[in-house]
Structure formats: structure tokens, C-alpha cells
Amino acid sequence: MKCHWRQGAATIGLAAATLTAACGGSTHAGGTATIPSTPTTADPWAVPAVIDTTYLQRVMDRLDQSTGDAIREMVSSKSVTPTAKAILQAVYTGGGYSMTLNDYVAISTDGFRKYRSSPGNPTTHVDAVISVHVGCVFFTAERTFAPALVNPPPPSDTHAFLALKRATPPSDGTANPTGQALLFDAFTRNGQQPKDPCS
């Protein structure tokens, strides 16, 4: 049953008992009523009706945190550990996962010497949405792994194209609670837009 307050002190005073009975609350001296509250917690990862840069930024901030966790795990052990693989598999999906995993396996051959001893998280600044398909969104961003690298790339090499695809969060939800995973994650030096990976 829904309970509605109407404006006006007299209305509120007269309606207190009715509201108490209808909503299951209790009355107190002075004609006031205690209305039971139903706690509501907004889901920060709920997909909005219109996918915009604000939502994509929130998702990417969380994925960057997990990617940083995977990098720190690999740098610490100087190898691509099962823990790092599990994190990467939560952050990436499809071809995005296989390409990223292969990259890190190749990097591990030199013991991650190009990475800082205490690497930071990659950072992503979402620029614009290119296209939205059912369960997939393609967008541009300025993206850099500079906080993790000894010699980071110049700013001219940070323009990236990314695609997020709906994904089932891992059972424990810790590595990626967003419900989105990276299907595509690529840098371009000339700004040329690749084929839409969502189409």
C-alpha cells in the first residue's frame, strides 16, 4: 500500500492516525506519527535509459581499479598469475580478454621491467559515445597506463577506442561488479576510428 502526505499542517495532523493504521506505524504524543521507512539503495551499476559519458566514466573508473590490481599482482610476482588472470577475465570479455592476456604474457618475459615497482592504476577520461547497440556501447576516451609505467607514452598516444559489453559479474563480485566488461580496448596514433566492434 502506498501512503501519501498532502500539504498543509491541518491535513497532516488529521491524517496521522489514518497513516499510522494504513502504514503500520505508531503514534506519539503531540499528534505525530512514525511512518516505517523502507531503505532503498540505488544500484550504482544500473544501466541508465540513455547511456552517457557519466555512466561510462563510472564504469571505467572501477575497471581501471581492477586492472591496476591485476598489474600490481603481476609485477609483484613477475608473472601472469592465476589471480591476475581471474581479474583480467572479469574486466575483459571475448577477444578483448584474449588479446590483453597475450599482451601481458609477452610482457612477462622480461619480468615486467617496463613497469614501476609500485604501479598505479591506468586512467581513462571518457570523451564521447560513438554508438549504442543492444548490450554493447562503443566510445572514445583519453586512456593511459602512465601511472604504471617507468617510461609512459607521450600524450599524443593516449587516444583510445573502447567497447563495453554486458557481462555477468563474477560470483564474488569483487573484481568487477559493474555488469560491463571490455570487449575492445585499442589506441590509435592517427585518430582513425576502427570498425565498430559492437556492430
Image: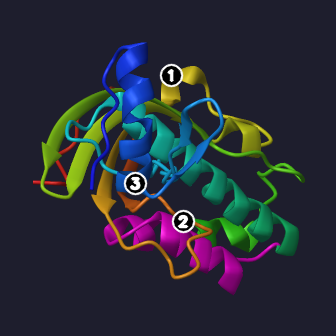
Corner quadrant of residue 85: bottom right
Marking on residue 195: none
Q: Quadrant of the C terminus?
A: bottom left
Residue 146 lies, with reference to residue 44, above or below; the image says: above
Residue bearing the label numbered 2: 103
Q: Residue at x 52, y 35 (%)?
A: 143
Separation (CA) of disc 3 from disc 1? 66 Å
Mark 3 or mark 2: whose residue is earlier in sequence: 3
Q: Nearer the viewer, residue 45 or 199?
A: 45
Mark 3 or mark 1: whose residue is earlier in sequence: 3
Residue bearing the label numbered 1: 156
Residue 125 lies, with reference to residue 139, above or below; the image says: above
Q: Quadrant of the N terminus?
A: bottom left
Q: Residues within 10 Å of mark 1 (few under 14, many from 20)?
A: few
Q: Amino acid at mark 3?
A: Ala
Give coordinates of residue 9: x percent, y percent: 43, 15
Q: Nearer the viewer, residue 4 or 53?
A: 4
Give coordinates of residue 55: x percent, y percent: 39, 37
Marking on residue 21: 3
Residue interval drawn in magenta: 78-101
Mark 1 or mark 2: whose residue is earlier in sequence: 2
Q: Residues within 10 Å of mark 2 (few under 14, many from 20)?
A: few
Left or right of 173: which side holds 169? left
Q: Is residue 61 visible?
A: yes
